[in-house]
Amino acid sequence: MTNALTDRQLNRATLARQMLLERSDMGITDTIAWLLGMQAQQTHDPYIGLWSRLEGFTHQALTALIVDRTLARATTMRGTLHLHTVDDLIGIRAEMQPFLRSVWLSNFKKRFGGNNEAAVLELARKLLDAEPMTAGQLGKRLSERFPVGEPLAMTMLLQSTDTLIQIPPTRIWGSGHSPVITRIGNWLPAPYERPIAREALVRRYLAAYGPASVADMQGWSRLTKLGEVFEALRPELVSFTAPDGRELFDLPDAPRPDADTLAPVRFLPLYENAILGYDNRRRFLVAGDELRGDFVNNVKPGVLVDGLMSAGWSIDSKKGAAVLTVTPYHQLRKKDVAEIEREGLKFLHFMEEKAETFDVRVLELAD
């Protein structure tokens, strides 16, 4: 017999696993490994995510780990950029290969101009092995040899077959330059093919994101046929029933805090994996927000209040004056506004270190 869990219980369980109930003293590398990587479409995303999770986190500490090649940024889950430990990048990227190939076939094959794939790949590899460059520069160089077809389609072909790393000094805090890429073999030590066992991947996903369904993990990763892996692991897992009747799996000893556990205000970056880690995101949403555009395909920078995505945020900094604007999705209690202002001021100081004045504005909910 399975036990029923409420959305609030699921929320608190996930917050605990994601280090969003209280900041952790875990190291940066261990945290990123625990989370199976951090979404890194935007340069600042992992910095923000780690600041909200770790005690004493600094920009410089993460940048140093990227520069010394302990961590690397490449395309993995959902065909999007993630920051990973080297071992996870190599293992997870190998598992993602069929999906990345399918993305290219669906989105870029028709724009490829009928070029010979092997010939394009040979030249693309030769060019990147000679020197790192931006994707735009690579596309331009390829189009000189293959004038028919879109440069982007040729560049994306290489990304669908080879692990491309975005390297410093681009994609680190304070860098405004276009990302420069190279092939993994030019940046990290061999070997480059160490697929992670799917059973191990399921266990680690549940440790950081559970309780969760098969569809949740498939939505997080875009891997397919995970149902058979969950079934093989069923004897060592526990199962629950979600409010909508879905079967959820979890590790027996994983934390599942009481539903009344207090959840602090937390600022989240764009495309936060704690939200995108599920096919069904109800555990983080106020009732009725399931179809809200912000939470369907694109998770905007958000503010967790009582564990729920309750507001968006933006920062404007001009002439030394930094302003954090918080836009509520729903009516907030006065004590919540006060907590947003306190946490927001700390967040603004983190984001705009060089500013001279700092102002947090929580907007009134429009009528």
Image (cartoon, helix red, strand yellow):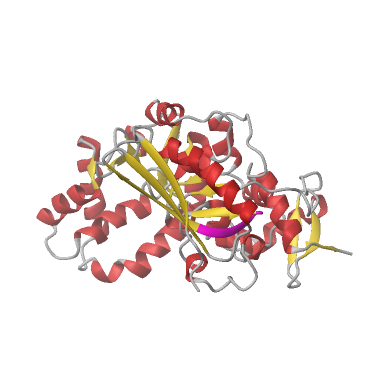
What residue do we see at 33% from left, 41% from top? 321
Q: Residue furthest right?
A: 1
Residue 12 location, x and y as percent?
72, 52
> At x 14% / y 58%, what residue is drawn?
146
Front residue of this view, candidates 243 and 82: 243
**Is 310 contained in the magenta span?**
yes
Nearest the eye: 147 or 74: 74
Q: Is residue 110 above or below residue 65?
A: below
The part of the image, by quadrant, that contains residue 253 is: top right
Residue 14 in sight from this viewpoint: yes
Quadrant of the frame with the N terminus: bottom right
Tell me: residue 330, above or below residue 177.
below
Q: Horizontal placement of 83 versus 52: left or right?
A: left
Taking depth in this image into account, of 33 and 367 the one nearest to the observer is: 367
Q: Residue at x 68, y 57 (%)?
A: 229
Q: Nearer the viewer, residue 283 or 352?
A: 352
Magenta span has 90? no
* Residue 282 spot, x, y in % from top left: 64, 65
The segment highlighted magenta reads 306-311
- Residue 194 visible in rendering: no
| Residue at 64% in and 41% down | 19
Q: Position of residue 306 (x, y in %)?
A: 66, 54
Is 178 situated left or right of 66 in this image?
A: left
> Please, is residue 113 above or below residue 199 in the view?
below
